[in-house]
Image (tube, coloured by chain):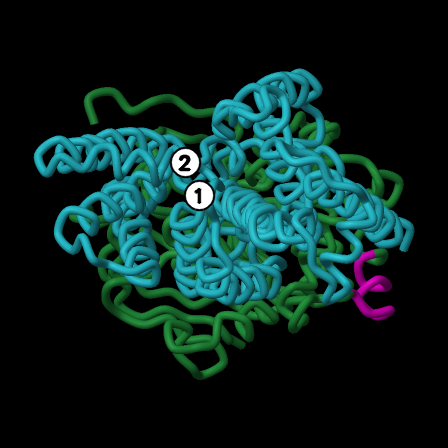
């Protein structure tokens, strides 16, 4: 089933076209990972799909209606977006930041209801950040801060969560912690997760559906076995990759690779 | 919630300080006035010399100080949040320079302009100055960055200041202009207050209503959109608010540098980073600050006036250095 899809999408910054004539569908209640080389338009696509930036041509349809015409507040109850390296928020406490996730549900001066507080506490609990509730966000480590921002996105109570490289700057254990948290949210609460990831093996390991991009185009979209192939990686990253099977997860894994010379 | 209670306690304390400062500002000055006269002046119809001084000279002047201080502080707070730039204030973003230039143009072209006309000119000037800065700062695709906007502000302010000075020299009205801009609060009349008060009041109410939006916007533009804010509409409304506040302040007291920059930083150190708290607290703190600065200006060398702009700078700097050193809950 598909709730969010894009048709013939053009996205540009000023005169520079980043994404050209792109169409895709995001499978519902699944984890989709987007991979691609630097500057291929992954982040741009993610921002356009969540209407953070406008698209110039084509359409993005969520639940049958064009998101460009949809009320932005209503959309914020369906889609949460965690930007790449979220801005530092000096002085803000963890609890305050997570409470901003309730913004799409509030009117007027925005007093938090008992229900809001319950949801905020739940978001803090599942991300393991309850302990820091009254600590300032900028006193936390990178991994803790990332979990707090995910908690804010969770407090938004959306069925879809988009994340732009949620594991950047984290060490291996913390990367896995974040990804397992997202996987848990997907499996236990059936949330649709769409994320850009740099690490190919992580992308394959956690995805139900993968999208490989190059120069603003989708080279291949499909299951991990379809996308994680030597052929696709050769086109997308100009690498000669040796693909094997992860003995623990049974997912495709890039064992080793070389640059393709002169390509 | 403990933080909520804390905030109201703090606001209440600030308000108490405000009442004290206001009373002191009415009592002290070139003419000596007792507390009893102040009470009579404010709450009765009795009249004598001292009471007249209060009613006709000091009261309008101190009310102007309150309005100017509150308006500049709140507009500075909004600008800092909107641009995510800790240095933003009405002076830096071209609003005061714009209002000054418009003032010069008006005094040169329409010497007979009345107070209302001059105030409208100041609003327009502030809006043009601000729009130029925001426009220039966001010309490059990707919106205004906190850094570009400072450069644009410096350039536009220098240009508009030059325009004001050029007009002043050419039409030989430099003295009139500087009387207006450097004169500060001297000679504020009830008539002026009547014209300006509603603008500032409405702008303040709108600022309060938008304060929650501003908190979100101050996080980051992308986060604000993701949370469902119509950021273009919010920014447009905030721009109108800061224009009205800065324009009104210039029309009332001329260019009062530093208040809009300084007060919000002091306030952040006290109440945190939620603009629902920053805005009301900035209004009160700005009023206290200006009352105090004006009181100092009138008393340290009485019966001569020390320019209030100088006092503001003298008071402001040490405060500012303390805040910068303390860091912590303000911008980093």
- Label 2: which secondary element: loop
Name the residue furthest left: B170
Please determine whether, in this image, residue A133 is positioned above or below residue A122.
above
> Would you say B230 lies left or right of B286 here?
left
CA distance for labels 2 and 1: 7 Å
Residue at 75%, 36% in the rendered image: B270
Q: Position of residue B122 (x, y in %)?
A: 32, 52
Please determine whether, in this image, residue B247 is positioned above or below residue A108.
above
Residue at 82%, 69% in the rendered image: A113
Residue contact at pointers 2 and 1, CB within 8 angstroms: yes
Chain rendered green? A
Residue B114 position by quadrant: bottom left
Q: Is residue A117 magenta?
A: yes
Q: Position of residue A250 (x, y in %)?
A: 65, 45
Residue at 38%, 65% in the rendered image: A24
Q: Which residue is mark 1?
A: B253
Callout 2 and callout 1 share a chain: yes
Range shown magenta: A112-120
Q: Which residue is mark 2?
A: B183
Q: Residues within 10 Å of mark 2 (few under 14, many from 20)?
A: some
> Would you say A54 lies left or right of A256 here?
left
- Label 1: which secondary element: helix
- Location of the C terminus of chain B by quadrant is top right
Dot 1 falls on which chain?
B
Q: Nearer the viewer, mark 2 or mark 1?
A: 2
Q: Is residue A34 magenta?
A: no
**Residue B317 visible somewhere in the drawing:** yes
Chain rendered cyan? B
Dot 2 falls on which chain?
B
Q: Position of residue B172 (x, y in %)?
A: 13, 34
Q: Position of residue B142 (x, y in %)?
A: 32, 45
> Would you say B96 lies left or right of A71 here?
left
């Amino acid at each position: 089933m598909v709730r969010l899809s894009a048709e013939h999408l053009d996205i540009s910054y000023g005169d520079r076209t980043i994404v050209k004539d792109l169409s895709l569908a995001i499978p519902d209640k699944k984890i989709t990972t987007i991979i691609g080389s630097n500057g291929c338009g992954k982040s741009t696509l993610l921002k356009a799909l969540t209407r953070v930036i406008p698209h110039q041509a084509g359409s993005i349809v969520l639940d049958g209606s064009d998101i460009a015409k949809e009320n932005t507040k209503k959309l914020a109850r369906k889609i949460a977006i965690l930007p790449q390296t979220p801005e530092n928020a000096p002085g803000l406490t963890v609890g305050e930041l997570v409470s901003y996730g309730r913004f799409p549900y509030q009117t007027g001066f925005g007093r938090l209801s008992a229900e809001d507080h319950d949801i905020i506490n739940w978001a803090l609990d599942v991300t393991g950040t309850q302990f820091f509730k009254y600590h300032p966000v900028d006193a936390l480590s990178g991994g803790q801060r990332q979990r707090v921002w995910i908690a804010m996105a969770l407090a938004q109570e959306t069925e879809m969560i988009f994340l732009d490289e949620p594991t950047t700057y984290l060490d291996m254990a913390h990367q896995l912690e974040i990804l397992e948290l997202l996987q848990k949210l997907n499996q236990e609460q059936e949330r649709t997760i769409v994320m850009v990831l740099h690490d190919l093996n992580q992308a394959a390991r956690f995805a139900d559906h993968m999208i490989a991009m190059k120069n603003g185009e989708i080279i291949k979209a499909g299951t991990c076995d379809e996308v994680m192939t030597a052929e696709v990686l050769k086109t997308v990253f100009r690498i000669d990759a040796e693909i094997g099977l992860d003995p623990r997860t049974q997912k495709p894994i890039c064992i080793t690779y070389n640059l393709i010379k002169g390509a | 919630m403990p933080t909520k209670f804390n905030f109201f306690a703090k606001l209440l304390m600030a308000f108490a300080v405000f009442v004290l400062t206001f009373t002191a500002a009415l009592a002290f000055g070139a003419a000596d006035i007792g507390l009893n006269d102040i009470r009579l002046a404010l709450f009765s119809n009795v009249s004598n010399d001292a009471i007249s001084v209060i009613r006709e000279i000091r009261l309008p002047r101190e009310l102007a100080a309150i309005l100017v201080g509150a308006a500049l502080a709140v507009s500075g707070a909004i600008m800092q949040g909107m641009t995510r730039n800790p240095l933003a204030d009405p002076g830096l973003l071209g609003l005061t320079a714009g209002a000054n230039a418009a003032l010069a143009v008006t005094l040169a072209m329409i010497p007979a302009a009345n107070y209302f006309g001059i105030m409208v000119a100041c609003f327009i000037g502030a809006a043009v100055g601000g729009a130029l800065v925001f426009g220039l700062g966001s010309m490059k695709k990707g919106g205004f960055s906190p850094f570009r906007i400072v450069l644009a502000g410096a350039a536009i302010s220098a240009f508009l200041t030059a325009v004001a000075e050029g007009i002043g020299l050419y039409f030989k009205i430099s003295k009139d202009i500087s009387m207006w801009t450097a004169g500060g609060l001297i000679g504020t009349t009830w008539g002026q207050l009547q014209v300006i008060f509603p603008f500032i009041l409405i702008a303040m109410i709108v600022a309060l209503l938008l304060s929650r939006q501003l908190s979100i916007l101050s996080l980051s533009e992308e986060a604000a959109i993701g949370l469902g804010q119509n950021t273009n509409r919010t920014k447009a409304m905030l721009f109108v608010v800061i224009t009205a506040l800065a324009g009104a302040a210039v029309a009332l007291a001329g260019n009062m540098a530093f208040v809009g920059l300084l007060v919000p930083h002091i306030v952040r150190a006290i109440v945190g980073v939620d603009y629902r708290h920053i805005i009301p607290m900035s209004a009160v703190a700005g009023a206290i600050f200006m009352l105090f600065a004006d009181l100092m200006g009138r008393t340290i060398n009485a019966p001569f006036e020390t320019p209030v702009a100088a006092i503001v700078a003298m008071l402001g700097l040490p405060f500012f250095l303390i805040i910068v050193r303390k860091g912590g809950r303000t911008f980093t």
